[in-house]
Amino acid sequence: MAEAFIVGAVRTPVGRRNGGLAGVHPVDLAAHVLTEIVARTGADPGAVDDVIMGCVSQIGPQSIYIARNAWLSAGLPENVPGVTIDRQCGSSQQAVHFAAQAVLSGTQDLVVAAGSGESSDCSWRSTRWRATGGRSARSTRAGSPGKSPRSAA
């Protein structure tokens, strides 16, 4: 029976909204991660069967096929396919599960699983953030800041 292993892990620094990474295009940021994982593991990028990338906010700069574009932006082989998936907050975890399933089934041997989550350019968050004056949606649901619907009753 086939086995699946995680052979390396790389992530960007944790940023904050409109912080130091806000000016870096998400495709370029993801490309740096992909380049680094290939370098650290010593994997042959031409042997990669697929790139699966989770992305919860496929809008704005993350909207156009970020998995494939990040792979190509990293200068990695054009023959490697990629797919971007959205399973909300579990998108990157789902990418890992799909990669493992592909290897365990024997249909693929080497799969890159990744994730992208950039919020500085996500218009849906910007609009909600401005509309609530910087408070979370939960703090405004009961009509009074800081009270949840349950505690307001």
Image (cartoon, rainbow, N blue to C red):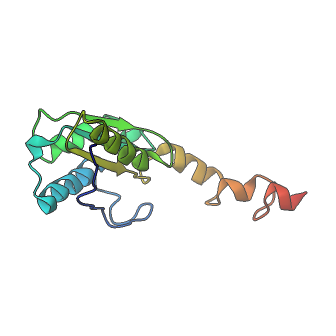
Q: Does 85 sit left or right of 39 as displayed?
A: right
Closer to us: 41 or 140: 41
Q: Residue furthest front?
A: 1
Name the image quarter holding the C terminus: bottom right
Residue 76 visible = no
Q: Residue at x 56, y 46 (%)?
A: 127
Total of numbered circles in the picture?
0
Residue 115 visible = yes
| Image x and y of residue 62, in percent | 35, 42
Q: Residue furthest right?
A: 153
Q: Residue at x 41, y 61 (%)?
A: 18
Q: Residue at x 61, y 60 (%)?
A: 134
Which quadrant of the view contains residue 99? top left
Closer to us: 68 or 143: 68
| Image x and y of residue 17, in percent | 45, 61
Closer to us: 84 or 18: 84
Name the image quarter holding the N terminus: top left
Q: Does 35 sit left or right of 97 as displayed?
A: left
Closer to us: 125 or 54: 54
| Image x and y of residue 140, in percent | 74, 55
| Image x and y of residue 80, in percent | 16, 35
Q: Does 124 sit left or right of 104 as displayed?
A: right
Q: Residue at x 40, y 49 (%)?
A: 92
**6 relative to 71, above or below:** below
**81 relative to 118, above or below:** above
